[in-house]
Image: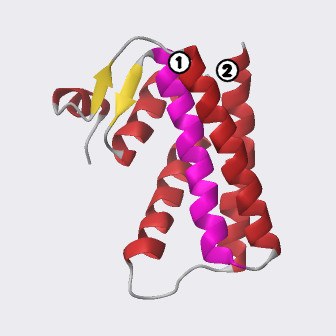
Amino acid sequence: MIDFNECLEKRLLRKEKPDKEKALIAVNISEERLMDAEISFEGEVFSAAILLSYASMFHASRALLFKDGFTERSHICLIEFIKEKYIKKGLIESKFSSLLNNAREERHEILYGLQRTETKKDSELVLKTAKEYLKEVKKIIES
């Protein structure tokens, strides 16, 4: 598994100028994806609900990335950034480290796997996680 420092070395995470405007745009996109995920869940399109819930978490994470002046070229490195800059410092609950990665893996399986593995229960968990995560991120962005 790649870690934060390797992500920097391989330029999968790059330092840039902090951009509050891009952070706010990413939060808005995250909120939109979350609404789409809820609609998909209610319509019992569980694979779409999982994909959209993960997309919400991805964009919420990017909001923090932009706020701190970084860009990413890897989903895994984005999660490593969140772990390094927010989870290790106690700014975001530690449970989100594994929840983000699990959602990323479910997304990958839905998009590229050869079997249907998503369930209503899985979809509900990822949607709940996305809601909680966005709430945490918005507190940080708005502070």
Q: Position of residue 90 (x, y in %)?
A: 59, 23
Provide the residue designation for mark 2: 140
Magenta part of the chain:
45-68
Mark 2 or mark 1, which is nearer to you? 1
Mark closer to the chain start, 2 or 1: 1
Label 2, residues with CA under 10 Å away: few <14, some 14-19, many ≥20: some
Residue 93 is drawn in which quadrant?
A: top right
Q: Position of residue 8 (x, y in %)?
A: 24, 27
Q: In the picture shown, does residue 52 fall above or below 9?
A: below
Of the residues shown, which amino acid type is indicated by label 1? Lys
Between the C-alphas of marks 2 and 1, the distance is 10 Å
Task: State the residue in front, 98 or 49.
Answer: 49
Magenta highlight on residue 10: no
Left or right: where does residue 76 sit relative to residue 25? left
Residue at far left of view: 10
Question: Colour mode?
Answer: secondary structure
Provide the residue designation for mark 1: 67
Q: In the picture shown, does residue 100 fall above or below 16?
A: below
Left or right: where does residue 41 sit relative to residue 85? right
Q: In the picture shown, does residue 13 fall above or below 127?
A: above
Residue 43 is drawn in which quadrant?
A: bottom right
Q: Secondary structure at mark 1?
A: helix
Q: Position of residue 74 (x, y in %)?
A: 33, 44
Does the magenta stretch mainly form a helix, a strand or a loop?
helix
Task: State the residue in front, 125 or 55.
Answer: 55
Label 1, residues with CA under 10 Å away: few <14, some 14-19, many ≥20: some
Residue at far bottom of view: 115
Q: Is residue 6 visible?
A: yes
Tell whether label 1 touches label 2 (CB within 8 Å).
yes
Quadrant for the C terminus, please: top right
Q: Is residue 92 visible?
A: no
Of the residues shown, which amino acid type is indicated by label 2? Ile
